[in-house]
Image (spheres, grey):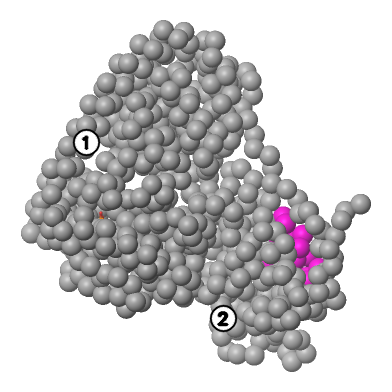
Amino acid sequence: MTSTRRLPVTTAAEALLATLKARGIDHLLANPGTDFAPIIEGFARAPSAGLPVPTPVAITHEAAAIAMAHGHWLASGRPLALMVHVNVGLANTLMGVINAARDNVPLLLLSGRTPIGEGRDRLGARDLPIHWGQEMRDQGGMLRELVKWDYELRQPEQVPDLVDRALAIATSPPMGPVYLALPREVLCEPLDGLELREAPLQRAAAPTVPSPASLDEAARLIAAAERPLVITSRAGAFADGFAALTALAERFALPVVEFWPSRISLPASHPMHAGFDPGPALAEADLVLVVDALVPWVPRRHELARGCRVVQLGPDPLFAATPVRGFPCDLALAGEVATSLRLLAEALEDRLPARVAAERRERLAARHAKARAERLAAAEAGGGPPMSPAFVSRTLARALPEDAILVSELGCDPSVMGFAAPGSYFGHPSSGGLGWGVPAALGIKLARPDRTVVATVGDGSYLFANPPACHQAAEALDLPILTVVMNNGVWNAVDKTTRLVYPDGSAARANEMPLTSLRPAPDYAMIARASHGHGERVERPEDLPDAIARALEVVREERRQALLDVVVAA
Ligand SMILES: Cc1ncc(C[n+]2csc(CCOP(=O)(O)OP(=O)(O)O)c2C)c(N)n1
């Protein structure tokens, strides 16, 4: 018999809050509106009713809230729930949904839906002009392409089963966001207690693994290759993927390129780390193993050697949600990354003679060490002024404590830093919806209050992040993070891509390229100080180490947020 627990709920809204809490969701990030009346009433009644509910966390902009939920998942592997105000709040989360979808981040997005009824008879029915203005024919339509599942709550009794189903689908591989719309009248509907199952109604699908035959085929291809190459942007979502890829690379002497990494996949100083540019190794590889990378290389810039075979591995190795993605695939291994890599290692065990691996290991280790030393030396030489982003990254890497978790959004350059542990570095999702970095770091700090969390962001990315909303959240929620703004005064990526398309064009020759300048820049340090944080501007390389040390001390000792506005070269 299913064991249940009776919860003293009186409305559908309370059933929702109680179910979320029972399913391990400790915080409900929210940006409320008129649709929240029964939710707010439920939160207020819960303590006296002895009803366990998540901690309500008000965030003053939805884009910040959803990126926080994103970061929370990255750092903890626990999905968060987020509730926003009807169609307008939902619209403000949309870019975050794109980022979460592309980064395979499971989160439960809830929003109100304007009341349906126009009459006087039902609690929760329309009572303000906006309730007509916020009506939509299909509110979920604006994000349906991006979520794995969506639905509009019809009956209060549905609440527990829908929450269980939504979470099971979100966390089934390939993971991603799900959405539930909540009309106000339904949230207001009465319930006389709730018999909640102790265990969720549905569980996430168990991770799949590739078939033994396909693993065998992949092992045969890798063993037969003279110049195999692994390219990844993330070895799965968790630490076990990092461990499995590191072990595979080490045992079989497989060079690994991290291209546009969204997570670190093996230690930066590992002898098999082949850097961050797939170009040179790709030009000579005869076998490429793509590990969970939407974009393993850029065909316009990188050349795949003739006759090179390509194996793609990951929960969704063909990235079915991406209509145009033409990377060759001779063999697709669909499976959870860590287990699939471990099974691949087993399949390779008797196929690759130890002597072959040893020779390759020695040759590659020397090549990689030389390339890394050259990268580091170039970074060290970038003191300017203005400093290069690589120089700032290097200086920061030297100062970071071992427990640090760093987020980068057009900020630091991981290729010169030296991350060694899984979960110590997160780059922006491949969708690149800017304004993600600072709030993602806040979400990481929420999940891991014990860790030193640093967001390094371009000045443009910082401005996209609704900075006052982020600094307010940092202060209100006691989330002291360090933000490093790489201030080059320009949307450099836009400038560079214009030059890439028109290298000899008028824009490339202009004194100031149209639509790229961020001048006059605001005083970024002052924005952090407005929320009682520590803020400093750094222009000279000799001032940087002490400024970083001061900021880290403020963050750790005073538990206050800090911001460094670091002037860098474009
Ligand atoms: C929401 C959003 N708007 C616009 C863009 C286009 N875009 C890509 S990079 C970039 C410039 C970012 O500037 P900054 O963070 O200062 O980094 P930099 O390019 O200077 O390195 C812009 C505007 C985007 N990716 N996301």
* Crowd band around label 2 with a 10 angstrom C-alpha radius: few (<14), some (14–19), many (20+): some
Left or right: 358 as drawn, with respect to 510: right
Left or right: 223 as drawn, with respect to 545: right
In this view, the mark in front (2 or 1): 1
Q: How many numbered dots are placed on residues in this image?
A: 2
**Residue designated by label 1:** 375
* Crowd band around label 1 with a 10 angstrom C-alpha radius: few (<14), some (14–19), many (20+): some
Residue drawn at (36%, 77%) of the image: 531
Q: Position of residue 277 (x, y in %)?
A: 30, 34
Residue 138 visible within the image: no
Mark 2: amino acid: Gly
Quadrant of ligand 1 in image: bottom left
Q: Does the stretch in magenta take in 566?
A: no
Q: Position of residue 342 (x, y in %)?
A: 56, 26
Q: Position of residue 227 (x, y in %)?
A: 36, 16
Q: Write the start and end of the magenta stretch as one range.
A: 152-165
The outermost residue toward the front is: 557
Left or right: 509 as drawn, with respect to 424: left
Under circle 1, the secondary element is helix
- Along the polypeptide, which appears first: circle 2 or circle 1? 2
Quadrant holding the C terminus: bottom left
Q: Quadrant of residue 334?
A: top right
**Residue designated by label 2:** 33
* Spatial CA span between label 2 and label 1: 51 Å
The one nearer the camera, 79 or 108, is 79
Instruction: Give the main secondary structure, helix, strand or loop, of the magenta stretch.
Output: helix
